[in-house]
């Protein structure tokens, strides 16, 4: 079986759920938010700030918490964003070396390319993404379809820019993945079963 499985995903496609269930099915470690927590602990930054940096192209200025809240000027901000990415790289490599695992997002497919991970990209159509976002996040219930669609597209845009910035590759490009899954077809549990049967033979 492949030691590491990476999951790239469109927002609302069910990629996180698929990754978690796949790890459970295979009996291996699962990393997602745990990466954010580890970075925050090592850098003494707030998890909220780290999370925002890792979801966006690092060319904007954000307030961050580090014994108080303040704004970074141009050079320190850019340096800090790159330091967070470097820390993320170190943590992901350490997790991958520790034991077989599933890692969701965080440019893991690129960071671990020398370890030959099984790279999955999860996508879906907009109606299914809207429904999944409403089902999994109560705060979305008060948004109109138009507002929620804009939110979904904004998250995807930020992920695409961030991924491009650090990898030089196009996020979601099929040539950079071993398997692309459309979760608008079938159920997540069915995809988990199919993928697990496949990767166990690798």
Image (cartoon, helix red, strand yellow):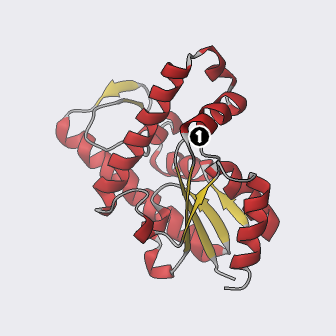
Left or right: 161 in relation to 31: left
Asked whether 3 or 36 is in front, the reply is 3
Quadrant in which the N terminus appears: bottom right
Q: Position of residue 20 (x, y in %)?
A: 72, 55
Quadrant in which the C terminus appears: bottom right
The quarter of the picture where residue 172 lies is bottom left
Q: Is residue 27 visible to us here?
A: no
Left or right: 174 in relation to 12: left
Q: Residue at x 38, y 55 (%)?
A: 85
Asked whether 131 or 102 is in front, the reply is 131
Q: Which residue is mark 1?
A: 12
Residue 28's place in the image compared with 82, above or below, is below
Left or right: 53 in relation to 13: left
How many neighbours does mark 1 have within 10 angstroms: few (below 14), some (14-19), or many (20 or more)?
many
Q: Position of residue 196 (x, y in %)?
A: 75, 71
Q: Residue at x 80, y 62 (%)?
A: 24
Residue 5's place in the image compared with 64, above or below, is below
């Amino acid at each position: 079986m492949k030691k590491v499985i990476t999951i790239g995903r469109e927002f609302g496609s069910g990629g996180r759920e698929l990754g978690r269930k796949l790890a459970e099915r295979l009996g291996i470690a699962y990393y997602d938010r745990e990466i954010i927590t580890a970075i925050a602990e090592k850098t003494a930054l707030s998890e909220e700030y780290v999370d925002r940096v890792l979801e966006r192209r690092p060319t904007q200025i954000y307030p961050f918490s580090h014994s108080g809240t303040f704004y970074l000027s141009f050079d320190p901000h850019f340096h800090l964003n790159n330091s967070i990415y470097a820390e993320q790289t170190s943590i992901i490599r350490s997790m991958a070396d520790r034991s077989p695992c599933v890692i969701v997002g965080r440019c893991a497919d690129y960071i671990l390319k020398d370890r030959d991970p099984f790279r999955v990209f999860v996508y879906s159509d907009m109606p299914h993404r809207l429904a999944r976002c409403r089902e999994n996040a109560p705060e979305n219930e008060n948004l109109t379809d138009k507002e929620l669609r804009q939110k979904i597209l904004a998250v995807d845009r930020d992920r695409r820019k961030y991924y491009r910035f650090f990898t030089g590759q196009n996020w979601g490009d099929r040539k950079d993945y071993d398997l692309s899954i459309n979760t608008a077809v079938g159920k997540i549990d069915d995809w988990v079963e199919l993928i697990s049967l496949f990767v166990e033979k690798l």
